Amino acid sequence: MALKNRETEGTELPKPLTETPGAKPETNGPRSRRSNEEVERRLNPYIDANPEKFARYTQLVKEDPHHAVRSLMLKDMQAHEGEMRFVAKQIPAAKEWYDQQPLDVKKTIDRRIAEVHPYNRDEAFVQAVVRERNWQNRLPLAQTARPVVAGARP
């Protein structure tokens, strides 16, 4: 679903300024918030049903923004840990498949994860193996001749 800018929603957006390639855009202030209608549609009833949580988070943000950020990061970390438990189950099979591959495939996977932070390396390794394995599984389909259908244009 597309994100919409709340301040300019329903109005025509200004044309972007032309920049030279590689130039960083100027920062003229804080970025405007964007809104995802689907998330808003699901979140509003949850907030309405849990006003005490909403009040607690609102107060936390006002009184101790640093702790509020850490609370949000904690939720992200817990989600990440859940993903990592799944990755830990996938690592043995991914390493086994990786070890059976020719050197060029190994180099491709190694290149994809070379600059990944060590904290996220296992997850990136599994994702790279899955991506490469999917590519290899689809490659024969792309190389087969397509049947000619009567009346179809080439």
Image (tube, rainbow, N blue to C red):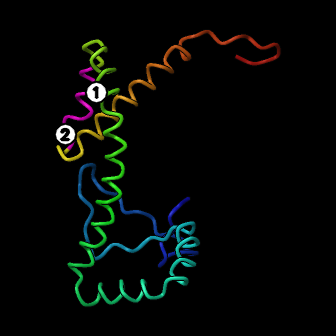
Q: Which amino acid does label 1 sit on?
A: Ile
Place residue 150 in its image quadrant: top right
Residue 109's label in the rendered image is: 1
Q: Which amino acid does label 2 sit on?
A: Glu
* Image vertical order of residue 124 relative to residue 63, above or below: above
Residue 127 visible: no
- Disc 2, SS: loop
Instruction: List x then y, in percent, for residue 108.
Output: 28, 24
The relative height of residue 16 versus residue 54 in the rendered view (above or below) is above
Instruction: State the residue position of label 2.
Output: 115
Q: In this view, does 140 lie to the left or right of 119?
A: right
Camera-nearest residue between 14 and 7: 7
In-image side of 144 versus 27 (left or right):
right
Instruction: Using the numbered discs, state the Cα–Cα distance from disc 2 to disc 1 in whole angstroms.
Output: 12 Å
Q: Percent position (x, y) of residue 43? A: 52, 74
For image coordinates 28% across by 66% down, the residue present is: 74
Q: Do the residues labelled 2 and 1 touch (CB within 8 Å)?
A: no
Q: How crowded is mark 2: few (under 14 residues within 10 Å), some or many (20 or more)?
A: few
100 or 144: nearer the viewer = 100
Rendering coords of residue 40 (x, y %): 54, 73
Q: Give the range drawn in magenta.
A: 106-116
What residue is shown at x 40% (from left), y 30% (from top)? 131
Q: Is residue 32 left or right of residue 121?
A: right
Q: Which residue does the image show at 35% across and 37% down from the upper left?
A: 89
Mark carried by residue 2: none
Q: What element carries label 1?
A: helix
Q: Is residue 141 magenta?
A: no
Mark nearer the N terminus (2 vs 1):
1
Quadrant housing residue 60: bottom left
Residue 54 in picture, x, y percent from top left: 43, 84
